[in-house]
C-alpha cells in the first residue's frame, strides 16, 4: 500500500472526500515529524511508538578502497509496534 492507497482507504472508511482524507493523512505525518524533530516521542496506544534513536559517531570502511572513514553521529527515526498491532498481524 502506498500513500495514495492509504488516502483512498481513509476516505472510504471515514466517509471523507479524498481531498479531506489527504489533508488528514498529511496532517498526521506532519505532526509526527514535528514531534520527532523536537525530541518528543509519539505513543499511539495499541498501535505503536515513534521515537528518535541516537547513533554514535563511528569509523567505517569504504567498501571499494578499504580506506577508513568517519561516520557522523546522527538521529534516526524508530518505530516499535504495540501489542494491538502485533496481535493483529499474527
Image (cartoon, rainbow, N blue to C red):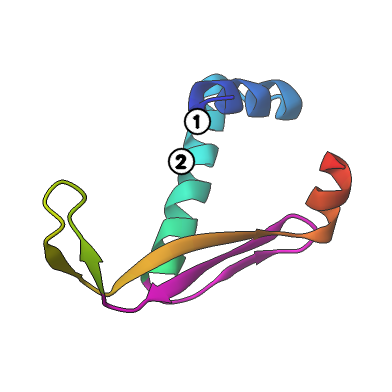
Is residue 39 toward the left or the right of residue 11 in the image? left
Give the farthest residue toward the front: 66
Helix, strand or loop at label 1? It is helix
- Position of residue 13 relative to residue 71, above or below, is above
- Position of residue 89 relative to residue 74, above or below, is above
Crowding at dot 2, Cα within 10 Å, few <14 / some 14-19 / many 20+, comes out as: some
Q: Magenta segment, which residues?
A: 38-58
* Residue 89 in magenta stretch: no
**Mark sitting on residue 72:** none
Name the spot of residue 2 as percent of width and height, x first. 52, 25
Name the spot of residue 85 as percent of width and height, x first. 79, 49
Q: Which residue is mark 1?
A: 22
Crowding at dot 1, Cα within 10 Å, few <14 / some 14-19 / many 20+, comes out as: some
Looking at this view, is 78 or 26 the one in front?
A: 78
Q: Which residue is mark 2?
A: 26
Image quadrant in which you'd find residue 24: top right
Image quadrant in which you'd find residue 47: bottom right
Residue at the spot x=11%, y=51% of the render? 65
Name the spot of residue 44 as percent of width and height, x first. 70, 61
Looking at this view, is 29 or 22 the one in front?
A: 29
Is residue 51 toward the left or the right of residue 74 in the image? right
Q: Does the residue at mark 1 contact the one at mark 2 (Cβ under 8 Å)?
A: yes
Image quadrant containing the N terminus: top right
Residue at the spot x=60%, y=20% of the render? 8
Residue at the spot x=50%, y=30% of the render? 22
- Position of residue 63 relative to residue 46, above or below, is above
Amino acid at each position: 500500500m502506498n500513500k495514495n492507497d492509504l488516502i483512498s482507504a481513509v476516505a472510504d472508511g471515514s466517509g471523507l472526500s479524498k481531498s479531506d482524507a489527504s489533508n488528514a493523512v498529511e496532517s498526521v505525518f506532519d505532526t509526527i515529524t514535528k514531534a520527532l524533530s523536537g525530541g518528543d516521542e509519539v505513543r499511539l496506544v495499541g498501535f505503536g511508538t515513534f521515537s528518535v534513536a541516537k547513533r554514535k559517531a563511528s569509523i567505517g570502511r569504504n567498501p571499494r578502497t578499504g580506506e577508513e572513514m568517519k561516520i557522523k553521529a546522527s538521529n534516526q527515526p524508530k518505530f516499535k509496534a504495540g501489542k494491538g498491532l502485533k496481535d493483529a498481524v499474527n
